[in-house]
Image (spheres, rainbow, N blue to C red):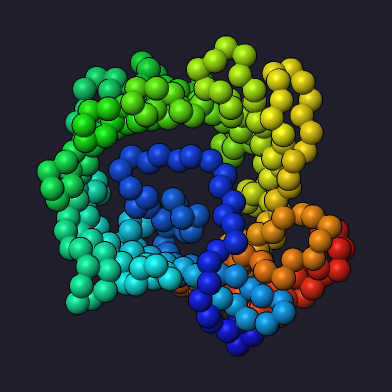
């Protein structure tokens, strides 16, 4: 095997957008794998071209049931070893409990989180109760046509932390609060297929003429993000200048990506590259990287300043 395992920190992570789900990410579709997936193994780390080593930083193993629901998640990282989460569902397939073991087998924190759902006309409330009794909630609001119009998230003290406003399927606006004050205000624009195409953040949230920072995102034909351009802060209506560009390269087994590399598109060669490997086992197939050498070839090509 070309990649050797060591331990170090992850260089950077490419964040596409803020996503708040009903309770937890529990469906195979949340992880962009087929419904008949049985096991998803994700290995994230850094590849060092000088040492010719792959430094593993995080491993996640997901086990799914026959209905595409997450049964168990195991995490191993440099900071935490052997975190486990077990998911329980009712007869309707709704999540009602999550057991967790944080830390090693003989030490760590063991407990359960319970989930309940309350529906009232055009409002649905999701409650999350921790082992110590603290309960947080998220409220979703719908119009008469059943379309989602907004979400509000409250912590265990009843303080609003997140507010999301939806403009049909074209955009949504996310506001983060602290001490009842807006600390973040971001508008996401989405394409017809639901992908986030741009992100506009107000640098001085709450002010009428706040500076804006724009980020645009491009996707390939398979719907995976391949380019993120971050611009300098500017006044509304002015054309901003490019600050930094991030690229993602994928390797596919059939229609599923099984390896992904993230890097900054600059003129200087980089000896470290963030790589994620995926092994996907379905009921009738195994999707995985067939030849790791293609990844090394692309890294060498990039470091010779050849445009990808």
Q: Residue at x 53, y 81 (%)?
A: 5
71 in relation to 188, above or below: below
- Residue 154 visible at all: yes
Residue 57 image point, x, y percent: 49, 70
Q: Is residue 232 left or right of residue 260?
A: right
Q: Specify the quadrant that holds the C terminus.
A: bottom right
Residue 276 image point, x, y percent: 57, 66
Q: Residue at x 46, y 28 (%)?
A: 183
Residue 151 image point, x, y percent: 37, 27
- Residue 187 visible at all: no
Q: Nearer the viewer, residue 28 or 268?
A: 268
Quarter location, residue 41: bottom left
Q: Nearer the viewer, residue 66 or 304?
A: 304
5 in relation to 38, above or below: below
Q: Is residue 111 left or right of residue 152?
A: left
Question: Residue lying farthest left?
Answer: 133
């Amino acid at each position: 095997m070309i990649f050797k395992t060591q331990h170090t920190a992850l260089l950077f992570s490419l964040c596409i957008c803020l996503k708040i789900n009903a309770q937890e990410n529990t469906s195979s579709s949340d992880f962009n794998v087929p419904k008949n997936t049985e096991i998803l193994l994700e290995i994230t780390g850094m590849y060092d071209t000088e040492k010719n080593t792959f430094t593993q930083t995080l491993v996640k193993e997901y086990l799914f049931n026959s209905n595409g629901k997450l049964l168990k998640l195991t995490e191993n990282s440099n900071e935490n070893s052997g975190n486990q989460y077990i998911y329980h569902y009712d007869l309707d397939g709704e999540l009602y409990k999550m057991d967790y073991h944080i830390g090693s087998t003989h030490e760590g924190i063991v407990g359960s989180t319970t989930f309940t759902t309350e529906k009232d006309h055009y409002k649905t409330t999701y409650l999350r109760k921790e082992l110590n009794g603290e309960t947080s909630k998220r409220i979703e609001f719908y119009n008469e046509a059943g379309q989602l119009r907004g979400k509000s998230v409250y912590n265990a003290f009843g303080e609003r932390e997140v507010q999301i406003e939806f403009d049909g399927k074209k955009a949504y606006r996310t506001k983060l609060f602290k001490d009842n004050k807006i600390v973040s205000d971001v508008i996401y624009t989405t394409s017809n297929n639901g992908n986030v195409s741009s992100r506009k953040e107000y640098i001085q949230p709450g002010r009428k003429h706040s500076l804006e920072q724009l980020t645009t995102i491009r996707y390939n034909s398979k719907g995976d993000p391949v380019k993120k351009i971050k611009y300098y802060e500017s006044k509304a209506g002015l054309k901003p200048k490019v600050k930094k560009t991030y690229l993602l390269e994928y390797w596919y087994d059939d229609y599923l990506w099984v390896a992904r590399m993230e890097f900054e598109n600059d003129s200087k060669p980089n000896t470290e590259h963030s790589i994620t490997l995926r092994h996907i086992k379905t009921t009738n197939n195994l999707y995985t990287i067939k030849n790791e050498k293609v990844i090394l070839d692309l890294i060498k090509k990039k470091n010779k300043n050849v445009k990808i």
